[in-house]
Amino acid sequence: MKKLLYLCLILMTCKYATAQVKVTRLDKTAIPKTIKYTGRIIDAVSFTDKDGEHLVITTESGIVPSKGPDSDNFRNEELHAYHYKKTAGELKLTWQTYDFIKDCDVDLAAHYLPNTFAVTDLDNNGIAEVWLMYKTVCHGDVSPSDLKIIMHQGDKKYAVRGRTKAKVSDTTYEGGEYTFDAVFKAGPKTFRDYAANLWKNNMIEDWK
């Protein structure tokens, strides 16, 4: 009997350890009309974890003119992320991310890096991690851009901040450095490993 119980425990543990969050990608028509967002949708997904049903939307504004009497040559760009959780049968906003570049009269960017959005369960606790990575910059040269990774797990926010790695001459690069915030430093190593790899694979500045 003890052997049977032990075997069952092993099977349950293995199943839990290999569990993955099932993510469903949504198009604009599949998003409930009650959900409010600003900008053009970049990613929209739903998923279910131990904490319930969730909806995440990321958006970008694109470059738009600044407003005001003295802003003829100035432009803005912004990005958003919204997380909704189903509570009592309704989707309610539980966190959001907002970043921007305002009143820029040279080259500007505020956008997500392609193929970096992800929903994971790296620590296998049944609660999903949502990963965002984006850059912001207003400059008229080839210097690095600001680069960030923002990750949410439940009500916790994790952040990595640094700069892209930019080629500033035929033989010289600048940037590429990053810093984990206190929450990342205190969190599981598997989170830092994932973030470091994400940074390594996406830090090179692309001027396209």
Image (spheres, rainbow, N blue to C red):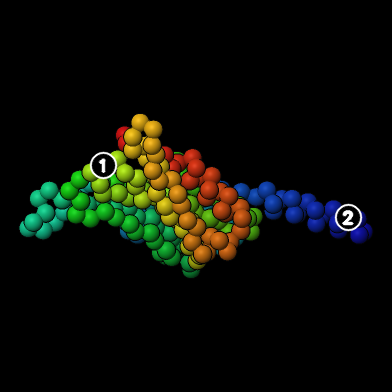
| Residue that sits furthest to the top in the current view | 170
Task: Identify which residue is drawn at 85% across, 53% down.
Answer: 7
Residue located 11% across and 54% down the image:
71
Q: Which mark is residue 141?
A: 1
Q: Picture coordinates of residue 23 (x, y %)?
A: 52, 47
Q: CA distance from mark 1 to mark 2?
A: 68 Å
Q: Secondary structure at mark 1?
A: loop
Quick check: can you spot residue 7?
A: yes
Identify the image quadrant of the C terminus. Answer: top left
Q: Are marks 1 and 2 in contact (CB under 8 Å)?
A: no
Amino acid marked by disc 1: Asp
Closer-to-camera residue (55/163): 163
Quick one: quadrant of the N terminus? bottom right
191 lies left or right of 14:
left
Name the spot of residue 101 as percent of width and height, x first: 26, 54
Q: Amino acid at mark 2?
A: Leu
| Count of number-bearing discs | 2
Residue 206 lies left or right of residue 68; in this view the side is right
Q: Can residue 126 be seen by looking at this rendering?
A: no
Vertical relation: 164 (above or below) 35: above
Q: Which residue lies at the image location 43% right of the left edge and 55% below the top edge?
A: 161
* Residue located farthest toward the left when viewing the structure as drawn: 69
* Residue depicted at 49% across the width and 61% down the height: 181
> Taking 67 as reference, is 43 left or right?
right
Viewer-nearest of discs 1 and 2: 1
Q: Which mark is residue 109?
A: none
Which residue does the numbered mark 2 point to in the structure image?
4
Up the image or down, 95 lies above or below 32; here it is below
Q: Secondary structure at mark 2?
A: helix
Q: Callout 1: 10 Å neighbours few (<14), some, many (20+)?
A: few
Q: Mark 1 or mark 2: which comes first in sequence?
A: 2
Label 2 neighbour load within 10 Å: few <14, some 14-19, many 20+: few
